[in-house]
Image (cartoon, grey):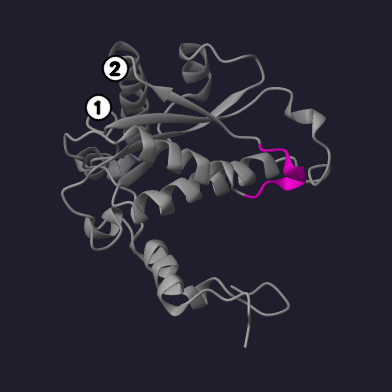
């Protein structure tokens, strides 16, 4: 018997949150309590990070004019992405790819400046600051699902333009726009699968033993 193991109920809840997490785009008009938002941000801050560098920064957007400006940047990139997709442009433009104006809370996740000072675990893999921040984002996502809230990760933006808009210091880098809020319902499957944009592939396609295998 493993004395460190959670109870069956607790284990089930963890796996349920993982399985039912969705990248949400549709939100309803209902505020997120401040204490709940604080819990989610604290969950993010408990993420593991390489060298304990804690490379995440969170900017909460509460100014409506600024939210509109963020939306315009996303819309600009949506149009450019559509053009770059060629034959799939029309199909892409039919997708709802963000919920910036509908979500209750809008968060920008960024990497700080002066990250080069952190060497531990990054000498040969400097991108581990991004990997560590992604762990923080996943923590929010899972905690939000457990709280009955939806979250969507938006990456359609020009990082330099968003950094300038938010008056971020030189060397810092925004990597995610998070749309957080109450939803009418959670998607039964990933939205892009429901919209026939892509298919979820089976796990066996991603696991090999000892050596790389296609």
- Check disc 1 and report the residue beneath it: 101
Q: Quick check: is 70 in the magenta stretch?
A: no
In the picture, the disc for residue 68 is 2
Where is residue 83, by image quadrant? Answer: top left
In the rendered image, the vertical position of residue 88 relative to residue 106, given as above or below: below
Instruction: Assign the N terminus to one quadrant of the image.
Output: bottom right
Instruction: Assign the C terminus to one quadrant of the image.
Output: bottom right
Residue 61 shows in the view:
yes
Please report the bounds of the magenta region as a residue range. Answer: 48-54
* Mark 1 burial class by Cα count in 10 Å: few <14, some 14-19, many 20+: some
User: At 74% across and 40% down in the image, what residue appears?
Assistant: 126
In the rendered image, the vertical position of residue 71 relative to residue 47, given as above or below: above
* Mark 2 burial class by Cα count in 10 Å: few <14, some 14-19, many 20+: few
User: At 37% across and 48% down in the image, what residue appears?
Assistant: 144
Under circle 1, the secondary element is loop
Under circle 2, the secondary element is helix
In the rendered image, the vertical position of residue 142 relative to residue 60, given as above or below: below
Residue 202 shows in the view:
no
Q: Where is residue 89 in the image (x, y as percent from the top left)?
A: 28, 39
- The reply to whether dot 2 and dot 1 touch (C-beta < 8 Å) is yes
Q: Distance between the residues labelled 2 and 1?
A: 7 Å
């Amino acid at each position: 018997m493993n004395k460190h193991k959670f109870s069956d109920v607790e284990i089930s809840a963890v796996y349920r949150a993982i399985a039912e997490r969705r990248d949400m785009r549709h939100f309803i008009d209902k505020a997120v309590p401040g204490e709940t938002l604080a819990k989610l941000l604290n969950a993010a801050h408990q993420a593991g990070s390489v060298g304990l560098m804690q490379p995440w920064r969170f900017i909460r957007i509460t100014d409506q004019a600024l939210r509109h400006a963020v939306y315009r940047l996303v819309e600009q990139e949506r149009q450019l992405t559509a053009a770059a997709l060629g034959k799939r442009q029309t199909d892409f433009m039919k997708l709802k790819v963000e919920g910036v104006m509908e979500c209750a809370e809008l968060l920008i996740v960024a990497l700080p400046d002066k990250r080069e000072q952190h060497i531990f675990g990054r000498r040969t893999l400097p991108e581990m600051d991004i990997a560590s921040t992604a762990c923080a984002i996943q923590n929010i996502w899972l905690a939000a699902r457990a709280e009955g809230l939806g979250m969507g990760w938006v990456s359609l933006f020009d990082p330099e333009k968003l950094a300038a808009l938010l008056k971020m210091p030189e060397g810092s880098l925004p990597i995610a726009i998070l749309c957080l809020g109450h939803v009418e319902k959670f998607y039964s499957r990933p939205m892009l699968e429901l919209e026939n944009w892509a298919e979820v592939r089976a796990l066996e396609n991603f696991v090999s033993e000892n050596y790389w295998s296609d």
